[in-house]
Image (cartoon, grey):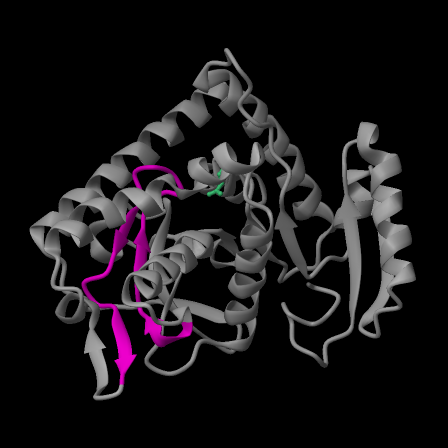
Amino acid sequence: MIARGLMLGPDQPIILHMLDIPSAAEALNGVKMELVDAALPLLKGVIATTDLVEACTGVNIAIMLGGFPRKEGMERKEVMSKNVAIYKDQASALEQCAAKNCKVLVVANPANTNALILKEFAPSIPAKNITCLTRLDHNRALGQIAERLNMHASEVKNVIIWGNHSSTQYPDINHATVITQEGEKSVREIIANDKWLSGEFITIIRQRGAAIIRARKLSSALSAASAACDHMHDWLLGTPKGTWVSMGVCSDGSYGIPPGLIYSFPVSCEKGEWSIVQGLKIDDFSRSKMEASTNELLEEKSLAYSCLS
Ligand code: LMR
């Protein structure tokens, strides 16, 4: 997808740096062989390596896919401590070797907290350049609304994912609209079923990752890759006027979210910069859901910091 221009546009040549762990080196080389065989016009070079410093040297964009998955019988703290160690090392390598204005997207779970650790250990990368993926949840919300209305996802806009990329995230449709033959209408007006919108819809989005794992026996792949492309594409090339997307970004205190936490907000993007959409009305139901996700992120933060000491 990246080498076909879906992430950075059809005119942007790229050099791909791919990093994997030593036990996957042969498979990684196989991917490199396939990339060469695809003769992709935009692909000007491929580095396939198991060396973190080589992978990070000079990169303008870093998409962090690596993490330690939870295995049967593992305690939360054990998983967190493995990921904290991984993100501390990767942060140090980016800090030392990446391009000064490198933009970072963390995909691996726990994505928000991995991004927080990365921010901590790569202090010279501007905090606004460190983000995590909630576009997958955002796109899932567009998809579910569209299915319910028998429409296309492109006719739905301005859903919001607030909070953590976890089962406490809050998919909010209070400001979402759909394009109908009579013009733009609010999703609440069109789907008059409050029970579905405030119940089943939220559960479907929160549990979608788990449902995919149950069905595929593997985590989401295509939709996650596509969402990562969407995230970087819109961040760098901009969001259409009047439209926002969801990104996990460093809170500036907007909507009462503690500053410094990596939290998913509605953002609009222009000239390579995101900004949190301001002034949206938050009702009591939304506020309580946003707070629940804040509290989970604060707990994850203290667990992560306890793994550092
Ligand atoms: C997803 O949302 O599909 C993934 O984050 C799920 C997972 O735990 O890998």
From this view, report whether residue 210 is shown above or below residue 276: above
Q: How many labels does the image show?
A: 0
Q: Does 279 appear in magenta?
A: no
* Residue positioned 62% across, 41% down in the render: 91
**Where in the figure is residue 47, as x and y percent of width and height?**
86, 52
Q: Is residue 44 above or below residue 74?
A: below
For this rendering, which residue is in front, 192 or 285?
192
Queried whether the magenta region covers residue 172, the answer comes back as yes
**Residue 81 rendering spot, x and y as whole percentages:** 53, 21
Residue 85 found in image quarter: top right
Residue 213 relative to residue 252: left or right: right
Instruction: Work out whether residue 123 or residue 138 is closer to the camera in this orientation and state it.
Output: 138
Asked if residue 100 lies left or right of residue 13, the reply is left
For image coordinates 56% across by 40% down, the residue present is 108
Residue 162 place in picture, x, y as percent: 30, 51
Q: Which residue is drawn at 18% across and 63% down?
A: 174
| Image quarter hosting the N terminus | bottom right
Residue 238 seen from this side: yes
Residue 120 in picture, x, y percent from top left: 51, 40
Farthest top residue? 73
Residue 308 shows in the view: no
Which residue is depicted at the point 36% across and 63% down?
Answer: 142
Q: Residue furthest front?
A: 150
Residue at the farthest left position: 284
Residue 280 position (above or below residue 97): below
Magenta stretch, residue numbers: 154-180
Q: Give the farthest residue toward the bottom.
A: 182
